[in-house]
Image: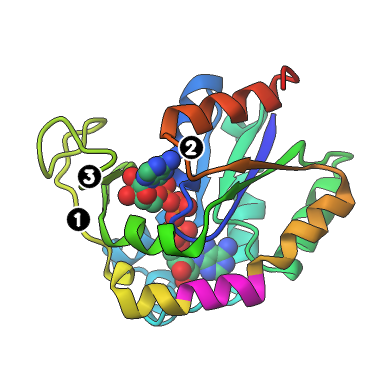
Amino acid sequence: MKIIMLGAPGAGKGTQAIMLADKYGIPHISTGDIFRSNIKAGTELGKKAKEYMDQGLLVPDELTTDLVVNRIEEEDCKNGFILDGFPRTIPQAKCLQEALKEKNDHMDFAVNVDVKAENIIKRMSGRRACPNCGATYHIESSKPKVEGICDRCGHELILRDDDKPETVKRRLEVYDDMTRPLIDFYTEEGILVSVDGSRDINVVFEDITKILEGKA
Ligand code: ADP
Ligand code: AMP
């Protein structure tokens, strides 16, 4: 199964993607996580990406697309994968489509996690992230078992630099301009499904799995 998670920043894409990856045993590929680990490791890619991320802007397509196209060629992706945070622009979506077409392949679902902007701001200000495994928590709605510590890997949780209110505002504007058009793109492709992401995490998950398994 090859799945794209679509939705505004903070809609819950990563939360759902990790649960889906665990359930179906396929890799969770988050471009945001890849950039953050490059920043931590001090690579050239990390240095370039940070300039854009800190301002709430998108990292240029030429630094992003090849990264994903190469990643999905790896052995662990042969039974499927979940893309989280990619594609974020129409050119990225077209490059992904072309790369798969060359192998006579295609994405199966683009899952749009739909949440209103006012809920999103609340979610992102309370988000805590694991810089090691990419899991996300919330200080009210999705607390870790031990405060400040990741349930999955035991690493200390952080507040992301780009979750500051002024950066969040810019990221939501960038989403509207650059990423929202993907909803129409994947509707035309015939693979878009939408879920109401404003409900409880487990209810949203159940809805998504029913759709993916053709039970909805
Ligand atoms: P995204 O990957 O789309 O940016 P995340 O999965 O990181 O979003 O979720 C953003 C924040 O909202 C996190 O703090 C997460 O714990 C919380 N969250 C995710 N889904 C829900 C939900 N259905 N209800 C309440 N809070 C949620
Ligand atoms: P995320 O973890 O998905 O919220 O992404 C964090 C930041 O990484 C975004 O605000 C962008 O600056 C950058 N980023 C992640 N994925 C992409 C992408 N597909 N294209 C461009 N920039 C991206």
Q: Is mark 1 within 8 Å of ligand 1?
A: no
The residue singled out by tag 3 in the image is 140
Circle 1 or circle 2, nearest the eye: 2
Q: Specify whether residue 61 is in view.
A: no
Sequence-first disc among 2 and 3: 2
Q: Specify whether residue 182 is in view.
A: yes
- The residue at the point 54 percent across, 24 percent down is 206
Give the magenta part as a residue range.
Answer: 171-178
Give the Cα distance between marks 2 and 3.
17 Å
Asked which quadrant contains residue 123, the reply is bottom left
- The residue at the point 49 percent across, 79 percent down is 57
**Residue 15, relative to residue 36: is it above or below?**
above
Give the Cα distance between marks 1 and 2.
19 Å
The residue singled out by tag 1 in the image is 158
The residue singled out by tag 2 in the image is 16
The disc labelled 3 sits on which kind of residue? Glu
- The residue at the point 45 percent across, 80 percent down is 170
**Residue 113, relative to residue 142: is it above or below?**
below
Sequence-first disc among 1 and 3: 3
